[in-house]
Image (cartoon, rainbow, N blue to C red):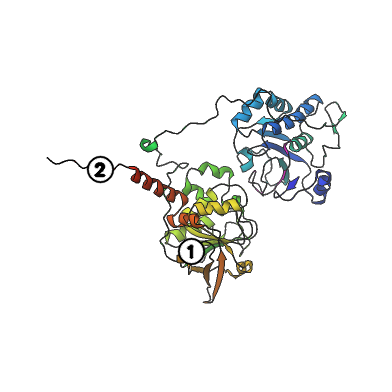
Amino acid sequence: MVHSHPDRAIPISKFAAEVRANNWPQRLEVGLIGSCTNSSYEDITRSASLAKQAVDKNLKAKAEFTITPGSEKVRYTVDRDGYLGVFEKMGGVVLANACGPCIGQWSRHTNDPNRKNSIITSFNRNFAKRNDGNPNTHAFVASPEITTAFAIAGDLTFNPLTDTLINEAGQAVKFDEPKGVELPPKGFDVKDPGYLAPAKDGSQVKVSIDPNSKRLQALSPFAPWNGKNWTGLKLLIKAKGKCTTDHISMAGPWLRFRGHLDNISDNTLTGATNFFNEKTDSVKNQLTGQHGPVPATQRAYKAAGISSLVVGDHNYGEGSSREHAAMQPRHLGIKAILVKSFARIHETNLKKQGMLAITFANEADYNKFQEDDNIDFIDLTSFAPDKQLTLVLNHRDGSKDTIKVNHTYNAGQIGWFKAGSALNLMAKQIAANKAAAKPAPVAKKRK
């Protein structure tokens, strides 16, 4: 069992004691299995074996229970083999094959969102507000079969390995060890996988988008680097503590805008805690001296032709691999992200979008950043692999601090940076290849 974040693991034998010691809500309100993680054929069959025991032993699930198959192939196959029917008999609800509740895309039934409550999932992330946007939800992560057992019991102090439950007839019953089937005996099957092959030649394909659409927007290429040092960057936010991709680009209802970069950018860094006031979505606008939302402040900088920098803590960008967490800052005019350390996938995503992802050579330099700082990059023109960069922090009182920062860019990734993004560089190379492949014009013989 894990609580709050994926690396806080608790053995099932000690979990009940932890629940009581930490005063976590003992009653379980929802159990959820599936999504992209822990939703294989074997996972589903192991959970279904417990669901069948519940039906056979006259147990009613005390918590809501949802099942999100990992793909249409898995959904079709486990439905064909009767496992989804078993879940439905137990009272489970089968959801669409999608990220679903893992990123907050579900209808959470609660009569009081301010009540502290517990849910348990077999998903791969359980940060605060991740699954339902509710800071009062305690989200626990376990295997699909443990999640299923807890959903049946509805009690976090229940140990399915040792404890009994009272069924509808008043009898004490105990779960047998769940059994799973590694691969479907009749093989996998699917009637409509949902895949539509692209046109062999897309050069004549036109994409029409309603100009008034709030959910779809054509992407414009990001501007390439101008080859000069950056000066006068505003400090947008100095994030304190955990800053995951959910803090950088929240999911849930916001995902309806994932096809519209400008609209979804209005959630950029709204979940990050500002070091200077301990608040979320409240940073100082150096142009006005007023505090306001992070996206609005950055838009004001962009409108004034001013770029900015974000400072962060350890493991910045932990969580989902969603590229919006890198595209949104880039779109809003944030030039660089400087942190103590990056989550690996997010660091790569920043590089692909032409962002400058850098880390402190000396982590103590994090403390040198002040709220009204303007930052200069004095040797960006010599950006090269394995070579540190130098920043000057210009403080409001006229004093300065000069710091060194590290990066992990190789020559190819520096090419992305110079081109404005990896996609820009690819497009440039494709155009060059097409031009090189054209046959040379044939000279006509004059008469």
Q: Can residue 66 be found in the magenta stretch?
A: no
For marks 2 and 1, give the one nearer the viewer.
Answer: 2
Question: In this view, which residue lies farthest toward the left?
Answer: 447
The residue that disc 2 covers is: 441
> Which residue is depicted at the point 46% across and 59% down?
300
**Residue 94 image point, x, y percent:** 65, 30
In the rendered view, would you say 435 is above or below 199?
below
| Separation of residues labelled 2 and 1 (CA atoms) | 41 Å
Element class at badge 1: loop
Q: Can residue 141 be found in the magenta stretch?
A: yes
N-terminal of the two: label 2 or label 1?
1
The residue that disc 1 covers is: 383
Element class at badge 2: loop
Q: Relative to 211, is 89 on the left or the right? A: right
Which region of the structure is painted magenta? 126-144
> Which residue is depicted at the point 69% across and 36% down?
33
Q: Nearer the viewer, residue 279 or 92?
A: 92
**Residue 174 image point, x, y percent:** 85, 32
Q: Quadrant of the N terminus?
A: top right
